[in-house]
Image: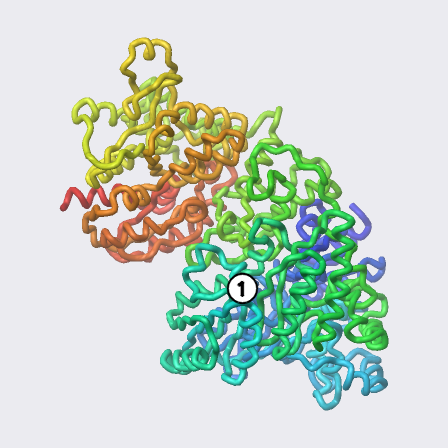
Amino acid sequence: MTDLEAALRTAVRGEVGFDVTSRALTTMDASNYRRVPLGVVAPRDADDVAAVLEVCRARGVPVVARGGGTSIAGQATGTGVVLDFTRHMNRLVSLDREARTAVVQPGLVLDRLQRAAAPHGLRFGPDPSTHSRCTLGGMIGNNSCGSHSVAWGTTADSVRELTVLTARGKRLRLGQEWAGAPEGLRELVDGDLARLRTGFPDLPRRISGYALDALLPERGADVARSFCGSEGTLGVLTEAVVRLVEAPRARALAVLGYADEAGAAEAAAGLLPLGPLTVEGMAADLVPVSAAALLPRGGAWLFVETGGESAAEARARAEAVVRAADVVDALVVTDPAGQRTLWRIREDASGTATRMPDGAEAWPGWEDCAVPPARLGAYLRDFRGLLATHGLRGTPYGHFGDGCIHVRIDFDLLTDAGVARFRRFSEELADLVVAHGGSLSGEHGDGQARAELLPRMYGEETVALFERAKSVWDPDDLLNPGMLVRPAPLDANLRFSVLPREPVDVAFGYPSDGGDFSAAVRRCVGVAKCRTTSAAGSSVMCPSFRATGDEAHSTRGRARLLHEMLAGELVTDGWRSTEVRDALDLCLSCKGCRSDCPVEVDMATYKAEFLHHHYAGRRRPAAHYAMGWLPVWLRWAARARVAPVVNALASVRPLAAVAKRLGGIAGEREVPRLAGETFSGWWRGRRRGVGRTGSGDLVVLWPDTFTEHLSPSVGRAAVRVLEAAGLRVALPPTLLPGRAVIGDGTSKSALALLTARRGRVCCGLTYVSTGQLDRARAVMRRTLDLMAPVLETSAPVVVLEPSCAAALRTDLPELLHDDPRAARLAARVLTFAEALERHAPDWIPPAVNRPVTGQTHCHQHAVLGDAADRRLREAAGLTGELTGGCCGLAGNFGFEDGHYEVSAACAEDQLLPAVREAPDGAVVLADGFSCRTQLEQLAGVRGRHLAEVLAEGLGRS
């Protein structure tokens, strides 16, 4: 233990982390930069903060305040001690409805304040797109704005008083009329009044530099306002009094379509006199194909929100906006759910923009310049020209009504030549922004990305004044050094420089990343959508973080540890790293990040890849053998006809306890009962008695391990429904290598019967999820051999278990990327609902006419989609919505020893409350075996597959 660490552990009551994991999680924010801290402290209160400052000041160690870690200019990284306010100093201290104020701690997430204020008809005005995870302290440090700034201004406009600690431990309460000003600040201002009155651009989004002009006497000498945007370089915030605004009772959203972004930009300023709440802009390049149909015609759009005392008033104002705008097309939405859907398209742009349309990487660095709104169109044209001159690409979006533009640019930050071009472009763009009367930063701060260029905007003398102000507040340069004043070069400390230049040898193909695992890990840019404390709507990501609140259990945290593993500086033992293993241990492999993360990080795949290498040549955990090889054990039990014996033994608690301990299974879990008759056994008996039925399209029903051995009732129900819809149902062949007839597991040739080997198709899911990728590949190749006759036909493959369908759709072609048959089989895979919709489009399902509750399977949400299921439920009269989130069992995860508490917490996030709150007579839908098992074991509720519900309806019709 170092002297610094020992001193901090003695001085503070909060957590002190100098371990590899704590440091690795805070090396980066959402910028291009990386710095390795000495340690991390999570203070419990202001006294802890004072103690940290005292210990670090005595040793000359820098201190960096950090909120949600979503800063885009590098200001939330540092080489000293990082203060993490999100763990303890995250409370809403009080809310005064009459005064319209709230007292908050710096680690409070904005959405928590908004939820507390909403019942009073109030809200905090600024709302960055990261509102679900950014903190009030970070917003004050960056002077954040968000989409509603045209109506309610920046964070500085919403601050009343700030309580801060200076680097030398002095507690100040900042406010107007010089309240809380450190000694020497007033004298500094009085000595340079002329410069402060003339040297600062008059912009709604001028965030760059220190807001020293807020200290002018005619502006109320507002020390609190001047502190906003100082990026933790002047003092450490411990509490804030913020102003709330009255939220409109109703809102409407006008989406205005324009031919291109320049047309949208030129129109934005003209809409401001109509008093909109937002004027946001984005271009078609940032809109996913799946979302394009939701927008009006055009190549770019303005999102203009209006408010009113009633829905009619809000709509009337939105329609007035449409009439005033010269548009290609327009859409007015008053439905709150519809508005949220459209806003998600805009909010996800910060992540979507990190990939160009052709998949090339794009990066921040010039994320939020701002110019006068009336000059935005001209600026964008010049900006596009500058990009072309340097051979760069980027798609601007952002706060058009304030003249503030966000953009990710496809800089090459991996080579010396690319970094040199990054610098040249940055210098020329800074000059362009200044030529248009703008600010280098319009929202996210200067940090390291832009501070070096501040002399181009303000001139050397004003920058020297900033340095003098920093010395007044922090004479020892202890707080976040290298930011804003005396900055590090904009091309130093780039986070990509530590990554390996040669491709890493991996098992998966990573088709979206050119087969490069480093590129896959680089996908995480740190916007931290995975750190939300509640799964909004149907979203899934990230259940383990919501259960533990630990950054290491977020998708971003795990990606950071993988980054450091590849870098080899902090995490030095590569694939053998225990730190990476422990962080991935609580990853449920739910695949939620594959769809919910704006850049589609796929942590389930990264986890499987890591486990594959981590345990190569070594003994694995018992659960990997017990549950990873589950298909083998279940087939052996079926062949030996010992299911009744196994069930009887499992019911004897002492024997079950021993078996669970040996198998690495959580003691709290009940071992699922094996079916007395497998699905395939039932099928063979039925075929002998019934023969083929149906005259429609042939569909091949996949007998997944769970349906085959644990819940064959689902398979039987599916056969009944598919045949009722007129489809011909078959099962995959079971003979190798002969020319087996699809579905009967036999052959017309006696010689083939004597020479062929029997086999069973398997998606390989259990092997993939436990990282046994060599075995998974072998199983998948055998499956492709068995499916050869099917692939020669046009028959679709219907998979009832969503996790198996997802494995066939994604894991199969990505793991067997060298076998073209894998992609062909993946393309054939349909869910139960998709098969009915595509191959029996005229079939009318039975009228069940009951409410439903339950949860969309996480793999279905992330990989397969549930649109066909929704339409099928609606046609059958099954009303109501299924929740998002993850059930928490997630295949082997919830059964593994040590995972039970997190598994149960995940179920309590959305699934179990939805079931408890369901109306009487509701059908509990759960297509996944894991989901049904979790419901049964935690709630005593029987969940049913949609096929079972429809089959039951057929019996009543």
Q: Is residue 762 left or right of residue 73?
A: left
Give 477 or 825, whichever is nearer the viewer: 825
* Res 11 → quadrant: bottom right
Q: Is residue 745 above or below residue 182?
A: above
Question: Does the rendering let one see residue 80?
Answer: no
The residue under the point 45% across, 30% down is 821
Q: Which residue is mark 1?
A: 283
Q: Position of residue 654 (x, y in %)?
A: 41, 28
Q: Which quarter of the image is occupied by the N terminus? A: top right
Horizontal and vertical percent position of residue 567: 72, 42
Identified at 70% across, 75% down, the residue is: 438
Q: Nearer the viewer, residue 290 or 845?
A: 290
Front position in the image: 917 or 68:
68
Mark 1 nearby-residue class (10 Å; few <14, some 14–19, many ≥20)? many
Asked if residue 103 can be seen in this view, the reply is yes
Which residue type does callout 1 highlight?
A: Ala
Describe the element under mark 1 as helix, strand or loop.
strand
